[in-house]
Amino acid sequence: MAKKREGQKGRYAYQGIERIMHEKARLSILTSLLTRPSGLRFSDLKQLCSLTDGNLSRHINVLEEEGLIEVEKSFNGKRPQTQCCLTETGRERFLAYLQELERVVRDAAVASKTHAPRKTKLATAT
Amino acid sequence: MAKKREGQKGRYAYQGIERIMHEKARLSILTSLLTRPSGLRFSDLKQLCSLTDGNLSRHINVLEEEGLIEVEKSFNGKRPQTQCCLTETGRERFLAYLQELERVVRDAAVASKTHAPRKTKLATAT
């Protein structure tokens, strides 16, 4: 038993889940940007992620400082515009993070299929 | 375009991601417990999730207060033992949360398949 437990050490630790991308709002922003390689304007991101101006700004700063996204400020006539897009590093790190998230879902799907079948089942379990 | 954007409002907001379960350590604990409906001892959880005593205790308290897990304290001879297991509510809420997580992975998989194919691809995209 002790041996079995030893083999399971860190089995569900999911070290690949980087907290910086795991934060809910940032996860929304990164997924939105992954779907639009050409980038998204601040106003579109705000809509897609249902975030307030303040929250979105704050999270954009964090992601930019980490080098995950690039922010370009320009003018459309007199109106300032902010355009965000994933960096190459950002894309790679986010995809690696998502692979770990997939592992969580798979582990849970196996468990929910194996034990006590109920109404709520994960799609990947079927 | 304005109309299209309107239809996409909150498209990537993922409201079903409940922060209480989304926290990395708690996600580990809940997934571990989902795989063991009979529950897990504190020492086993600690191993499986690679958490310190202090961290695990803290997160167990949060999950218990939220009604997601049940904690039973007993004695094995003179040694105190703590056993944790998911409550019925906890199981249901965690499975609902996981379904939302699956949505994130699916959205990202579609995006990573559609745009700029690279080495790192999500399994569900293939």
Image (cartoon, coloured by chain):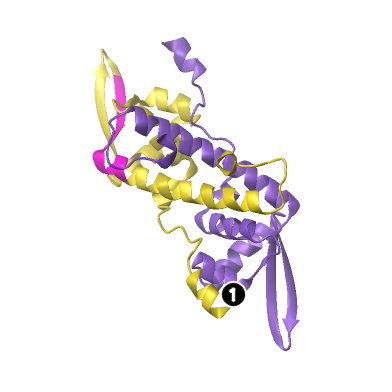
Chain colours: A yellow, B purple
Which image quarter holds the N terminus of chain B?
Answer: top left
Residue picked out by circle 1? B43
Dot 1 crowding, Cα within 10 Å, few <14, some 14–19, many 20+: some
Numbered disc 1: secondary structure: helix
Please check the rendered image and state whether residue A87 is part of the magenta-colored stretch, yes or no: yes
Horizontally, is B113 left or right of B35 in the view? left
Q: Is residue B82 above or below residue A99?
A: below
Nearer to the camera, A74 or A47: A47
- Mark 1 is on which residue type? Ser
With A72 as the anchor, is A123 left or right in this view? right
Relative to the observer, which residue lies in front, B38 or A56? B38
Q: Position of residue B9 (x, y in %)?
A: 51, 22
Residue at 26 percent of width and 12 percent of height: A77
- Rendered location of residue A23, percent (x, y): 46, 46
- Please check the rendered image and state whether residue B52 is part of the magenta-colored stretch, yes or no: no
Chain assignment, label 1: B
Q: Which residues are magenta?
A: A80-92
Residue B44 visible in this rendered orientation of the protein: yes
In the displayed structure, A41 sits above or below A102; it is above
Q: Residue B71's spot in the image, x, y percent?
A: 72, 66
Tell me if residue A34 can be seen. no
Q: Position of residue A22 (x, y in %)?
A: 45, 47
Quadrant location of the C terminus of chain B? top left
